[in-house]
Image (spheres, rainbow, N blue to C red):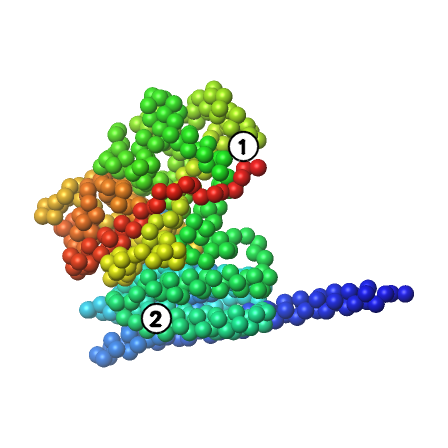
């Protein structure tokens, strides 16, 4: 005879099983509703683009106003759709939202593709030009409409799980903070704040479809309150908008709500994207999942490996001369640079190793795709280590201390692969996120001055610095996916000359594949610790941040008379005042890491 207790347990199991099935069914319905709204937004965007194309094709005199109205409507619905589109179809999203810059894809010398840009940024510049080229407007509107129709016909969200929605939600929050409010994709209208409000409006609507997931009703209400407050704050003026306060008062509290939500929903993620699942700040040493940036999947970043890598990094006996180490050109007291315009025997300035693990491409010309690959290149370079991995491995194995450490940490001991891994582990650890700015924006202290906050707001707004040096790493790796590190053509001069300036002769990326349109292109470096890394630019031409800011304020190379067809930096002067430049530099000085012990990492055992 079944006991009452056993019967009670059986009932609990059955009820729990039913609850799980009902919850799964509710989630399926939520994604159905989400898909319907998403497809509706795509359709409205397509309709507006078709009307724009038709308007541009007419010969009426008064056609500019309706063209612009159709563009703005299309853009609004694209921003509504952006949250889902950017997550489920990254490539098409990038196509539709790319800057008006020639797109070059280089796999090797036999596979080089050059593609003329299209999409909303291109269309915005065309529609709001002083002299509107109607044929070009019609061409791009038709191309974009056809692309969106294809996307619409291939949309299917009903197989998605709750964790997919949480990723979409977090990406939307991060995109607003890191690119949305900077003007990254609204080059002419600077309509970024209004468009960010569109994104929040859709986030709120989508979240309502998942109300059934919340066990804690107060948590759901907290989300609604936060999203409403964010939309209200985004009604501000682009030039005067307080981006620092927005991130502190809205972005970071929303990340905290996101962490609470995954706990409330009892969500288990199959893997981790760029952001760690427990991240509640965009500016902390626990924000990023370092494995996301590691194509080689080289394992956990263990403290013992980091310490071993540091020894190797600073050991000159690994080079053929016995006098050069990685630390020769990357000195810790100079934020892992060497203070020289060009390192001894080299043709370029020594880049910082700080935050090097948070990028997609190494060396100024991105000729290496991983830290380990960069190490190989340095070892083999005749003007650097001038040795080989095999020879370096023999040196390491001859030292009992190294041999013992490698045998304790790696199954195969001091192999070439493991030596590279140890050095790379040390470099990856150089991302402490403990600068004065980090501590303040993460709420750990309140020590930033008004000037420093103004400088950040200018950096992220009027000065357009953050449209190339993306927060929070302030390098060229594009958030929130962090899968691509950009290269730019700035028109850097050979000397400090604003009257008879000539382009620096270094051809940069061109030297790899001989692609004509990639002459003088260089990777966008991090600005963290920039106060310690002078001189600046790939050739070390500028010795002060004031000189660098003057170069940008003039419009880069174009502003000092260097005319290059593919300059990616807008040629227009920024019109920053002397005080605004001082404020931006004051902010940049807050990005210097605090001297502290390395963060506690995992154990190798």
Q: In the image, what residue occupies the spot 19% across and 55% down?
A: 581
In this rendering, the answer to whether 127 lies above or below 472 is below
Which residue occupies the extreme top position in the image? 398
Quadrant of the image occupied by residue 443: bottom left
Q: Nearer the viewer, residue 419 or 221?
A: 221
| Residue 583: percent from left, percent from top | 22, 56
| Residue 251: percent from left, percent from top | 41, 63
Q: Return the residue at label 1.
A: 409
Q: Which mark is drawn over residue 234?
A: 2
Q: In the image, what residue occupies the spot 23% across and 80% down?
A: 62
Task: Give yes or no for contact between labels 2 and 1 (Cβ–Cβ under 8 Å).
Answer: no
Indicate left or right for 330 with 209 as reference: left
| Residue 264: percent from left, percent from top | 57, 64
**SS state under label 2:** loop
Quadrant of the image occupied by residue 466: bottom left
| Residue 150: percent from left, percent from top | 46, 65
Label 1 crowd bin: few (<14), some (14–19), many (20+), radius 10 Å: some
In this rendering, the answer to whether 55 lies above or below 310 is below
Q: In the image, what residue occupies the spot 50% across and 39% down?
A: 302
């Amino acid at each position: 005879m079944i006991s009452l207790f056993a019967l009670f347990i059986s009932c609990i199991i059955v009820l729990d099983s039913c609850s799980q099935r009902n919850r799964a069914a509710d989630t399926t319905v939520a994604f159905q509703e989400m898909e319907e709204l998403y497809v509706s937004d795509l359709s409205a965007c397509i309709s507006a683009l078709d009307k724009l194309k038709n308007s541009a094709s007419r010969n009426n005199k008064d056609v500019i106003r309706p063209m612009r109205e159709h563009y703005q409507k299309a853009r609004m619905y694209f921003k509504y759709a952006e949250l889902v589109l950017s997550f489920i179809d990254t490539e098409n999203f990038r196509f539709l939202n790319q800057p008006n810059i020639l797109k070059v894809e280089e796999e090797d010398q036999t596979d080089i593709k050059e593609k003329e840009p299209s999409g909303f940024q291109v269309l915005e510049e065309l529609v709001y030009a002083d002299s509107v080229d109607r044929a070009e407007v019609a061409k791009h509107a038709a191309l974009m409409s056809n692309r969106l129709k294809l996307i619409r016909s291939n949309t299917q969200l009903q197989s998605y799980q709750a964790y997919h929605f949480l990723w979409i939600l977090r990406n939307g929050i991060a995109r607003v903070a890191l690119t949305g409010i900077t003007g990254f994709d609204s080059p002419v209208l600077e309509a970024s704040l209004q468009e960010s409000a569109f994104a929040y409006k859709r986030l709120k609507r989508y979240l309502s479809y998942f109300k059934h997931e919340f066990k804690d009703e107060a948590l759901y209400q907290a989300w609604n309150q936060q999203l409403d407050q964010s939309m209200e704050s985004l009604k501000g003026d682009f030039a005067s908008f307080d981006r620092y306060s927005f991130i502190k008062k809205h972005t970071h509290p929303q990340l905290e709500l996101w962490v609470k939500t995954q706990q409330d929903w009892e969500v288990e993620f199959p893997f981790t994207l760029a952001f760690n699942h427990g991240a509640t700040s965009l500016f902390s040493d626990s924000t990023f999942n370092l494995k996301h940036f590691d194509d080689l999947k080289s394992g956990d970043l263990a403290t013992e490996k980091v310490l071993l890598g540091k020894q190797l990094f600073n050991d000159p006996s690994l080079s053929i001369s016995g006098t050069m180490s990685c630390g020769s050109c990357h000195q810790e007291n100079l934020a892992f640079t060497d203070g020289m315009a060009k390192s001894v025997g080299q043709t370029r300035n020594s880049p910082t190793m700080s935050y090097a693990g948070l990028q997609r491409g190494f060396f100024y010309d991105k000729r290496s795709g991983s830290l380990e690959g960069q190490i190989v290149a340095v070892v083999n370079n005749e003007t650097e280590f001038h040795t080989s991995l095999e020879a370096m491995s023999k040196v390491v194995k001859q030292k009992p201390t190294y041999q013992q450490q490698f045998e304790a940490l790696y199954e195969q001991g001091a192999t070439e692969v493991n030596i590279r891994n140890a050095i790379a582990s040390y470099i990856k650890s150089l991302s402490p996120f403990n600068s004065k700015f980090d501590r303040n924006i993460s709420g750990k202290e309140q020590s930033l001055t008004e000037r420093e906050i103004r400088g950040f707001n200018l950096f992220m707004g009027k000065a357009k610095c953050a449209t190339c040096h993306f927060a929070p790493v302030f390098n060229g790796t594009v958030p929130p996916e962090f899968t691509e590190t950009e290269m730019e053509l700035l028109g850097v001069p050979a000397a400090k000359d604003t009257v008879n300036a000539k382009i620096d002769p270094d051809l940069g990326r061109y030297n790899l594949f001989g692609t004509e349109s990639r002459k003088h292109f260089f990777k966008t470096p991090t600005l963290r610790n920039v106060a310690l890394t002078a001189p600046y630019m790939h050739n070390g031409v500028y010795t002060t941040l004031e000189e660098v800011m003057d170069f940008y304020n003039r419009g880069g190379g174009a502003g000092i008379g260097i005319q290059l067809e593919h300059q990616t930096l807008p040629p227009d002067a920024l019109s920053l005042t002397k005080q605004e430049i001082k404020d931006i530099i004051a902010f940049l000085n807050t990005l210097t890491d605090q001297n502290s012990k390395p963060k506690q990492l995992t154990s190798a055992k």
